[in-house]
């Protein structure tokens, strides 16, 4: 999935981002929470001696301002710049802070807004739901399939929509108007904008992906304040969204390092897929080259390990409060495969939990914390199935997100001390444009597509108790279409044999061509891709995403807000400023 392209983009950005003036991190207009840790860094072009440079923060020398000595490195990492760095600093006094860095008579200036949080604390707990890539059309499609629609009116509301607070969230990163899940999640978890592929760092010029200037995450902050923390997903636990709760790296694919970062921060409940990066290469399917067995290390640190849904539930009934659950070597299978089609990894991993069960177990465990908790829940395959142009699977995992949110809302209503937030981390270019209707003459998708007055309500069977229609293979299907795609073959039918693979590697290096297997499906047509040749899947969009929220602190959300404000809302509700 797209990782190849992101990695390449990240590499180019790291190597080629040699600007002419000095750069100050955090960047201009950064919002900084009082007491939250960050790395201060200034990069000067060329190789000036320290004495030829001057830095003033609020009119003071940085060491005096932060009460901590910094270090100056000429030609940092052998590159054509020099750097002044102080790691792990904090600012405790709110207000505007101006930073000026001068060399050779030229100055660069940034201004930060340092903000405190007001007392008393409004919320004991925060539950942050991320629908990865969750866009407006995913919600519409999930509502149509899950609630039904008659004469233009739905049979009910989705839980994710039926919340009192709502805002439009813009998701652009510091480098691009379109984010990936790494820097978009970092914005939520640290309150700082970052760049594509980066987690919990500003994208500086460091060679090592682990040396870029760091910003503290809400996972770290909450742990430092004695709160419990949960990170649960149905993707690999090392994937960008869950990793964003604890990680600091310029490269989201640093999976082995990310596991180490989970171990360092120690969220109380950790659940997802991605077991190989916890195990040494000597223990197949282990991928760790440092020989460490992190499952064993977590167990020695007091965690119960669960490899199946049954083991996860047993840990809950046993009263466990620290749980590491890894249910698949890759991503946990989506709802359509687990409940109905039994494809994907289901034959190999028949006892994987549903996100609803993960949420229930997490709430049971985390709510035992006197000081409250922060729980991040990701329905991560909405994004992955959108990349693979697999509309039905993306819709079913949106319904799964909705079911998981219901459990959190029921929990939150009991004491009204929990802020619940539901938001996508970035959008996909998806739209509900009508229906594919087999009763229309012809065989090809364009002939079967009904738009405007021909877009009659789809005829999925009535949904089951969990809101899922028991079949997607019906004669009038929702047309949730994608605005970007590689070369592919398409017949407007659901992929009953497993997740769609739209494109495969072509003969020319770094190009992708249509997957011929799809070209053999009845009624299939060849579609010319409309994205760069080295992209093998649908891409993200820069559209805003919708945020809904309930509970104390939810009144913070209204109108349009940049994604970094979600962090501000959470830490304000929890009064995590110092
Ligand atoms: Zn994605």
Image (spheres, helix red, strand yellow):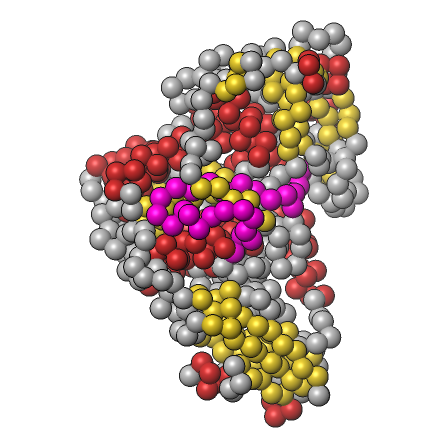
Image position, residue 25 (x, y; %):
57, 71
Left or right for 338, reference 319: right
Q: Is 102 above or below relative to 503?
A: below
Image position, residue 212 (x, y; %):
55, 68
Viewport quadrant of the N terminus: top right
Left or right for 415, reference 166: left
Left or right for 517, reference 171: right
Q: How many marks?
A: 0
Give the residue at x 60% y 87%.
54
Viewport quadrant of the C terminus: bottom left
Give the residues drawn in magenta, as a range. Answer: 537-564
Give the residue at x 46% y 18%.
155
Give the residue at x 56% y 59%.
193
> Which one is in front, 578 or 435?
578
> Which one is in front, 277 or 23?
23
Is residue 439 something that shows in the picture? yes
Image position, residue 220 (x, y; %):
38, 60
Q: Is 163 above or below relative to 115?
A: above
């Amino acid at each position: 999935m797209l990782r190849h392209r992101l990695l390449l983009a990240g590499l180019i950005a790291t190597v080629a981002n040699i600007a002419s003036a000095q750069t100050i991190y955090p960047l201009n207009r950064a919002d900084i929470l009082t007491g939250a840790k960050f790395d201060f860094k200034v990069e000067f072009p060329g190789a000036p001696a320290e004495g030829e440079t001057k830095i003033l923060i609020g009119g003071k020398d940085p060491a005096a301002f932060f009460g901590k000595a910094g270090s100056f490195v000429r030609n940092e990492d052998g590159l054509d710049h020099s750097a002044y760095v102080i790691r792990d600093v904090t600012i405790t006094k709110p207000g505007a802070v101006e930073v000026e860095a001068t060399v050779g008579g030229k100055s660069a200036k940034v201004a930060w807004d340092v903000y405190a949080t007001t007392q008393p604390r409004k919320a004991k707990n925060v539950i942050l739901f991320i629908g990865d890539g969750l866009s407006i059309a995913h919600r519409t499609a999930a509502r149509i399939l899950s609630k039904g629609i008659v004469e233009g009116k739905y049979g009910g509301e989705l839980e994710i929509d039926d919340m009192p607070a709502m805002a439009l969230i813009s998701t652009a990163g510091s480098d691009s108007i379109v984010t990936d899940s790494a820097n978009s999640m970092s914005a939520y978890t640290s309150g700082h904008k970052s760049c594509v592929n980066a987690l919990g760092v500003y994208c500086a010029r460091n060679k090592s992906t682990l040396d870029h200037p760091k910003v503290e995450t809400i996972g770290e902050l909450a742990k430092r304040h004695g709160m419990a923390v949960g990170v649960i997903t149905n993707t690999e636990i090392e994937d960008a969204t869950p990793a964003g709760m604890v990680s600091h790296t310029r490269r989201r694919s640093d999976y082995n390092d990310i596991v180490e970062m989970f171990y360092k921060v120690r969220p109380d409940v950790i659940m997802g897929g991605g077991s190989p990066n916890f195990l040494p290469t000597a223990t197949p399917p282990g991928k760790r080259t440092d020989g460490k067995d992190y499952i064993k290390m977590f167990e020695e640190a007091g965690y119960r390990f669960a490899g199946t849904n049954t083991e996860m539930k047993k840990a809950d009934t046993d009263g466990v409060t620290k749980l590491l659950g890894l249910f698949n070597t890759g991503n946990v299978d989506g709802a359509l495969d687990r409940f109905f089609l039994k494809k994907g990894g289901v034959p190999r991993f028949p006892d994987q939990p549903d996100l609803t069960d993960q949420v229930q177990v997490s709430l049971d465990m985390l709510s035992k914390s006197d000081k409250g908790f922060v729980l991040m829940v990701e329905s991560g395959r909405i994004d992955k199935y959108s990349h693979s142009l697999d509309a039905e699977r993306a819709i079913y995992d949106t319904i799964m997100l909705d079911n998981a949110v219901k459990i959190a809302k029921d929990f939150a209503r009991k004491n009204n001390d929990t802020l619940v937030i539901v938001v996508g981390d970035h959008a996909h270019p998806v739209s509900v444009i009508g229906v594919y209707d087999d009763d229309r003459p012809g065989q090809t998708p364009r002939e079967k597509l009904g738009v405007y007055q021909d877009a009659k309500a789809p005829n999925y069977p009535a949904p089951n108790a969990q809101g899922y229609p028991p079949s997607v293979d019906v004669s009038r299907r929702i047309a949730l279409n994608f605005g970007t795609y590689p070369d592919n073959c398409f017949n407007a039918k659901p992929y009953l044999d497993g997740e769609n693979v739209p494109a495969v590697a072509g003969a020319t290096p770094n190009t992708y061509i249509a997957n011929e297997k799809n070209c053999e499906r009845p009624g299939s047509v060849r579609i010319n891709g409309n994205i760069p040749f080295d992209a093998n899947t649908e891409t993200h969009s820069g559209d805003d995403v919708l945020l809904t929220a309930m509970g104390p602190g939810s009144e913070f959300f209204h109108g349009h807000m940049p994604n970094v404000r979600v962090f501000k809302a959470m830490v304000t509700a929890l009064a995590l400023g110092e």
